[in-house]
Image (tube, rainbow, N blue to C red):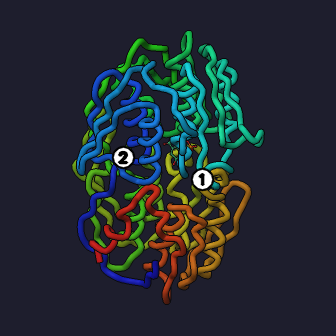
Amino acid sequence: MELASIQGLKGKVSVPGDKSISHRCIMFGSIANGTTEIHNFLKGADCLATIRCFQAMGINIEETDHTITVHGNGLHGLSAPSNILDVGNSGTTTRLLSGILAGQKFESKLSGDESLNSRPMKRIIEPLTMMGANISSVLRNGCAPLYITPGDLHGIHYNSPVSSAQVKSCVLLAGLYADGETSVTEPSLSRNHTELMLREFGADIRTLHSLSGTEATAYIKPCPELYGQKITVPGDISSAAYFIAAGLIVPDSEILIENAGINPTRSGILKVCEDMGGDITLLNERCEGGEKIADILVRTSSLHGITIEGDIIPTLIDEIPIIAVMAAVADGTTVIKDAAELKVKETDRIETVTDNLKAMGCSVTPTEDGMIITGGTLHGASIHTLLDHRIAMAFSIAALVADGTTKILDSKCVDVSYPAFYDTFEQLL
Ligand code: S3P
């Protein structure tokens, strides 16, 4: 994809359904009794991988243009897959599905692409093993392929060293199959879609926040059954983030992003934009299925550098590439700290973000847990996405404010979370 600078992005966009929520609808719908009807499901490669995995375990999932219908088979209604489950590029599929597979009476293997198979899985192998699961890394390197055989699961309390919704959700899902209550404490609250949605499906699940610090603990009790739901997936704030940034940094712009999820465990990007001086207004705020939603109006603003650190990091972890792009054209210096988790995403995003910003002429220094960026003028360059969808999209926005032409290599990787990204873009031009 070749892009050049523009001015005056104006209009309305709707972003596709939330990726995290779309995965969970399929998973919970598959192990619920009855039918789950999903509207605004994200048909990105990651969520399609989740659909294929459950179809491979005998779940009937029907797709039409606008609706996905999952015919759930109950908590114990999955059947043994005849092949290795292919999780593609998706960490969410791998980690959440492992929690469910740990509670099944059949053996299974799952494996993904090169990036997925190099991401850390010890973080789920350890707590699942503590619960009595039999799960191992086939190559004994702490990564997928994973091999899971039946085990009797016990309720545990797990103190997670990282704030990770994938780890938390994995343990909570295994907890559905345990012999007693399971709880997970994390250093600060990560996205809570699992907790909100499992409750809607009828699970006995609650979260308590520590009074003295930032810790949060989710508790789940095994339950006899879950019940199919009708769900409209909110627009993905992580996809909206690219248009929020475009609206703020492209001169003479005004963009309305409709129906975006603004769950507080996901909306750190909004606070950061405001703190950087961005003109952002939330309109039409509402709540559906426990999830907050709003329309987001953004107008061109002159941004300034800030420090981003601490508890807010888990609420914007996927948005750091696009935040870095905004920082690269803001006035002054932005410091991003406490974000070492970036190293274990689809790529090492400290490296991919800083390497590509440098290629565009930005003054940026990678650090152990983040980066330091001094704003200035960006120049067109060849962007090496390393097949990371968020790098492709973030740098497509950078291209709009850079001198000359920017080439996004392997831009097709946007299909992972936002297949219509470039079409939506054109709509605004
Ligand atoms: C996700 C959780 C986050 C996020 C990922 C989706 C989820 O990962 O980066 O894109 O759906 O639970 P971690 O939980 O590992 O931080």
Q: Earlier along the polypeptide chain: callout 2 or callout 1?
A: 1
Viewer-closest of 218 and 224:
224
Q: What kind of residue is marked 1?
A: Asp
Q: Quadrant of residue 121?
A: top right
| Side (left or right) of 19 relative to 149 | left
Residue 36 to residue 309: above or below:
above
Q: Assess mark 2: CB under 8 A from ligand 1?
A: no
x, y percent for residue 416: 46, 56
Ligand 1 within 8 Å of disc 1? The answer is no
Element at label 1: loop
> Helix or strand or loop: what does disc 2 sit on?
loop
- Residue 111, quarter of the rendered image: top right
x and y percentages locating residue 133 in the rendered image: 65, 22
Q: Is residue 322 at least partly visible in the picture?
A: yes
Q: How many marks?
A: 2
The answer to which image quadrant residue 427 occupies is bottom left
Image coordinates for residue 292, horizontal then vertical, percent: 32, 41
Check disc 1 and report the residue beneath it: 113
User: Considering depth in this image, is 372 or 181 the residue closer to the camera?
Assistant: 181
Q: Residue at x 57, y 68 (%)?
A: 385
Quickly name the residue at label 2. 262
> What residue sits 62% from the left and 14% below the top?
152
Circle 2 Cα neighbour tier, 10 Å, few/some/many (<14 / 14–19 / ≥20): many
The one of 319 and 180 positioned closer to us in this rendering: 180
Q: Position of 9 compared to 242: left or right?
A: left
- Figure check: 228 above or below 376: above
Name the amino acid type tagged 2.
Ile
Q: Residues within 10 Å of mark 1 (few under 14, many from 20)?
A: some
Depth-wise, is mark 2 or mark 1 nearer the camera?
A: 1
